[in-house]
Image (cartoon, rainbow, N blue to C red):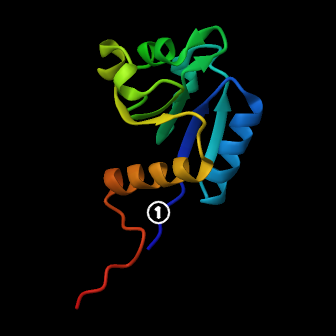
């Protein structure tokens, strides 16, 4: 059994990094949409199964972006940051962050975290379970 393709919004200011991470996620069949963080977060975060947010966006921080997005639009977030989780502010820890990934981001590691998230949320198994 495999995980059904999902819609992922990747909010990242660096077009090269967006492309690099997006290619890896697309290889797993996901529909990846991109944003640099400009515009209204309400419009950017509609109809996505998962949102991945970088800490440095165009004109604002990833933290500011997340504060503007409601929990209905974005249940959980994978957050990409150059800071370690323990160094983050207490306010940031209160957001719906599923996983905190420290940069530089390994695209394969991101793909594994995304897969783990969808397995946890949907209950789908990646590999068939055989009973002995």
Mark 1, Cα crowd under 10 Å, few <14 / some 14-19 / many 20+, is some
Indicate the position of residue 61 as horizontal and vertical percent values: 55, 13
Which residue occupies 31% across, 59% down? 123
Q: Quadrant of the C terminus?
A: bottom left
**Count of labels shown?**
1
Indicate the position of residue 128 as horizontal and vertical percent values: 38, 79
Q: Residue furthest bottom?
A: 132
Q: Is residue 47 visible?
A: no
Q: Residue furthest top?
A: 59
Indicate the position of residue 44 as horizontal and vertical percent values: 58, 25
Depth check: give the residue in front, 127 or 8: 127
Q: Is residue 116 above or below residue 84?
A: below
Q: Residue furthest left?
A: 132
Depth check: give the residue in front, 93 or 125: 93
Tell me: 84 left or right of 17.
left
Q: Is residue 5 above or below residue 10?
A: below
Indicate the position of residue 6 as horizontal and vertical percent values: 52, 51
Which residue occupies 63% across, 43% down? 32
Task: Check disc 1 and report its element: helix, strand or loop.
Answer: loop
| Residue 20: quarter of image | top right
Which residue occupies 61% across, 58% down? 29
- According to the image, label 1 marks what residue? 3
| Residue 86: quarter of image | top left
Tell me: 74 left or right of 18.
left
Q: Is residue 80 visible?
A: yes
Which residue occupies 32% across, 79% down? 129
Q: Quadrant of the N terminus?
A: bottom left
């Amino acid at each position: 059994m495999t995980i059904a393709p999902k819609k992922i919004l990747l909010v990242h200011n660096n077009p090269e990094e967006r492309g690099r991470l997006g290619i890896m996620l697309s290889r797993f069949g996901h529909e990846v949409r991109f944003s640099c963080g400009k515009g209204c977060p309400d419009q950017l975060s509609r109809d996505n199964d998962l949102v991945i947010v970088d800490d440095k966006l165009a004109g604002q921080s990833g933290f500011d972006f997340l504060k503007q997005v409601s929990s209905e639009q974005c249940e959980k977030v994978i957050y990409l940051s150059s800071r370690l989780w323990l160094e983050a502010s207490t306010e940031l820890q209160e957001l719906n962050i599923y996983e905190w990934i420290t940069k530089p981001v390994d695209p394969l590691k991101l793909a594994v975290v995304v897969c783990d998230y969808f397995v946890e949320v949907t209950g789908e198994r990646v590999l068939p379970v055989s009973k002995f």
